Image (cartoon, rainbow, N blue to C red):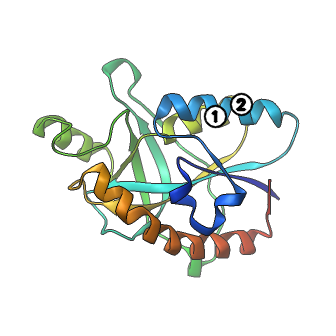
Amino acid sequence: MKIALFSAVAEEAGAWAPRFHFTGIGRENATRSMLDFVTHHQGEDYTIVNVGTVGSHAFPVGTILSIDEIVSAGSPFNDFRMQPTHFQLPPALDVPHATLYSSDSFVAPEVYTEDHLALMKRQAQCFDMESSAAFSVATSFGIPYVSFKIVSDNLDVTIDIWRERVVELSKKMDGYLKKVLENLNAEVI
């Protein structure tokens, strides 16, 4: 099995960074990066594995999640749900499953009104800024997509605090990702 590892930024990839492809932050950057990658790998058989950080109101910082569903939102005309594929993992590697809300901005109280934040929290347990775009490109090309995320904050920090935490959290994700790839006997492209 061949796997292409993706993350928004190198800090999220930790020790695996040399084997990752980076999209940059935000849906527009993710779309461009994913389109470039899949265009250069047409005809190859592989799965995209998206790894990174998420904010969450439902899970503590440091929790690794498997994403079951992505809500793509940000404006009323593009609110829809997507369901990624999943690897069959042994119970020792099993982690909580979550719905992810993918928007165009960092999710924090100073960005969204209290009412809109409450609506978002009813729709999902975690939040990022790239997943809906990455998933959309992958599925448009018929490429399986899997996503593992680690909780970096509880929607209560600034982007600067996220930057401080992400390096340490990536170490925990490194260990989990190593076990997943060993279990799958996967080749990273």
Q: Position of residue 97 (x, y in %)?
A: 45, 61
Choose top left, top right, bottom left or bottom right for residue 103.
Answer: top left
- Identify which amino acid the numbered label 2 is placed on: Asp
Is residue 163 something that shows in the picture? yes
Q: Nearer the viewer, residue 165 or 80?
A: 165
Secondary structure at badge 1 equals helix
Choose top left, top right, bottom left or bottom right for residue 1.
Answer: bottom right
Q: CA distance from mark 1 to mark 2?
A: 5 Å
Is residue 148 something that shows in the picture? no
Graded by Cα atoms within 10 Å as few (under 14), some (14 to 19) or many (20 or more), the crowding at tag 2 reads: few
On screen, residue 188 versus residue 81, left or right, reads right
Query: Mark 2 = which residue?
Result: 36
- Identify which amino acid the numbered label 1 is placed on: Ser
On screen, residue 104 versus residue 3, left or right, reads left
Query: Mark 1 = which residue?
Result: 33
Q: Nearer the viewer, residue 167 or 68?
A: 167
Secondary structure at badge 2 equals helix
Q: Position of residue 170 (x, y in %)?
A: 50, 67
Q: Is residue 76 above or below residue 108?
A: above
Graded by Cα atoms within 10 Å as few (under 14), some (14 to 19) or many (20 or more), the crowding at tag 1 reads: many
Q: Is residue 183 above or below residue 24?
A: below
Kindly indicate whether the residue at mark 2 contacts the one at mark 1 (C-beta within 8 angstroms): yes
Q: Kindly identify the residue that appears in the image at 30 percent across and 53 percent down.
A: 160
Q: Nearer the viewer, residue 176 or 20?
A: 20
Q: Kindly identify the residue that appears in the image at 31 percent across and 65 percent down.
A: 59
Q: Position of residue 75 (x, y in %)?
A: 32, 22
Q: Nearer the viewer, residue 130 or 45?
A: 130
Q: Residue furthest top?
A: 77
